[in-house]
Structure formats: C-alpha cells, structure tokens
Amino acid sequence: MENSAPILLIAGSAEAHEIAAKIAQTYQKLQAILRRAERSFGPLAVPSQIWTPGSVEEMKKFLIDRKITAICDAGHGFDSDIADLAAAAAHDLALPYARVMRPVWPVKAPVLRARSVADAAAMIRPGARVFAATGRGTVGQFAPFAGDTLFLRQTSTGARTPLPDFAEPVYGTPPFSVDEEIALFETLGIDTLICRNVGGNPSRPKLDAAMRLGLRVIVIDRPAPPENAPLLETTDDALRWIKALGALAG
C-alpha cells in the first residue's frame, strides 16, 4: 500500500484504533477525527483531532481543505448523526465512503428492545434500581425518572457537572468480566439493565451477567447506517477497503 493521498478516519470505536495502528505502518496517510476524548483506549496511532461537523456543508469544507480522498467511518455505532453527515458530504464530493459496523448482538425475549434512551427510560418500572451503560451524556433523557436509582457507568472520576438527584456514578475501567458484572449488580441491588446494542465481545459481559441473574433487560437498538453506504464488519474488511483505494489511486 503506497498511496499517500489522505484518507479521513472517523474514530470512536475499537476498530478505529486497530485500523489506525495498521495503517500507521504503511505509506498511506490517514488523519482522524473524534467526537470526544476517549478514556477506554490509548491515543490513536495517526494524527487526530476532536471535532464534530455541524452540517453537511461544514463537513464538505473540512474534506476539501484537507484534500481528503475517501472516508473510512469507524465512529461509534451510535454516532449516526456524524455518519449521516459524512456520507452525504462524500456523496456530494464524489468521494468513496464506507461505514465500519460490527454485527449487533442477537436479542430475543425476554430481553426488551427500545429505539432510544428516552424510549428505554419510559419503560422503567416504579422503584426500579437501574444500571445504565448509555453514557453520561444521556442522563438527561432519563428524566423524569420513575425508578428508585439510576446507576450510571463512568470511566473517569474527573470533575464534571453534577448528576441529577436520581443518578449515581459507578466508576470502573473496561473491560469487565461476566463475574465482575454479576458481583457489581448484586452489590448494588440492580433489578434492571439498560444498554445499547453496540455488538462485539468486550461490551457483552454486562448483558450476559444480567441475563444470568434474571434481571429485566432493555437493549437499545443501534441506528441504521447511512442509506446505500458500503458496510465493513471487521478491521480486516476496512483494511482491505483502504488497500483497494490505494490500488485504484496507483
């Protein structure tokens, strides 16, 4: 792979770090953007910046200014707003675009499904002790809260805005084992788990732990990818796609 034309990597997933690490060993130029600072991974192996496009036009300007020739979108599976903007901008500029999305977990009864955090919040029973792995930025979507307590997983004890009265942080650094999640749920007296269907093995233990304990489980469906976008399920798929771009450019 010897193509030096820059490709944009939208990061936010484990796959993005794997892609960056592999491409950093080649001649391919890759630059990355992230929505937020990541606490679960180390730094990306390619130049990166924290930036979120506010519109398709803003995204197009970014791509043009940096002479981007393609977009490999390995952003978080629930960052569908960025994916949609990037895909639309790539379409308008006739640039190749592909979305990296690992397969979701198969979900069947008695697990319940919700379309969003707000929908899941509306399904909480009065007095429930809820463990939510949906991110601190979603806490406002749980109000008004019908349960007893919302335990929200956090990866950092750094100073942040206070949580509402109904929420308590639970600090920890992933990955977690099924046994660790079982012990945590039992210690906190959890009876309900709410999580997003991000797919993959590292995030799965909380779901397996809750099902072993017979907890009420609400899984939030992942948003659909941009319409007509090529989908890449694995890091290797993404690397082959990038390699093919280099061959075409050469």
Image (cartoon, rainbow, N blue to C red):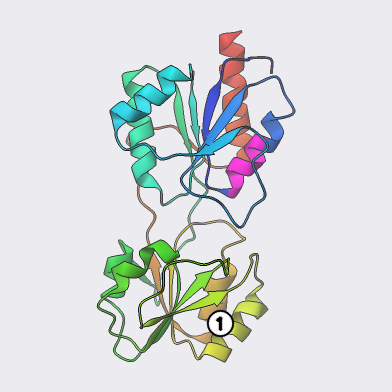
Residue 19 painted magenta: yes
- Quadrant of the rendered structure where residue 221 is? bottom left
Residue at the image point whose x is 36% and y is 89% from the top: 148
Give residue 237's position: percent from left, percent from top: 59, 35
Q: Is residue 66 left or right of residue 57?
A: right
Q: Residues within 10 Å of mark 1 (few under 14, many from 20)?
A: few
Residue at the image point whose x is 64% and y is 36% from the top: 20
Q: Does residue 192 show up?
A: yes
Towards the viewer: 142 or 209: 142
Q: Find numbered disc 1 in the image and state the secondary structure of the residue it sits on.
A: helix
Give residue 54's position: percent from left, percent from top: 32, 38
- Image quadrant for the N terminus? top right
Residue type at the position of mark 1? Arg
Residue 28 painted magenta: no
Name of the residue lying farthest toward the right: 25
**In the image, residue 161 above or below residue 67:** below
Q: Which residues are magenta?
A: 14-20
Towards the viewer: 153 or 164: 164
Q: Which residue is mark 1?
A: 212
Q: Does residue 226 show up?
A: no
Give residue 149's position: percent from left, percent from top: 39, 86
**In the image, residue 37 above or below residue 168:** above
- Quadrant of the rendered structure where residue 195 is? bottom left
**In the image, residue 35 above or below residue 182:** above
Towards the viewer: 67 or 245: 67
Name of the residue lying farthest toward the top: 250
Residue at the image point whose x is 65% and y is 45% from the top: 43
Magenta stretch, main secondary structure, is helix
Number of numbered discs on residues: 1
Give residue 143's position: percent from left, percent from top: 27, 75
- Image quadrant for the C terminus? top right
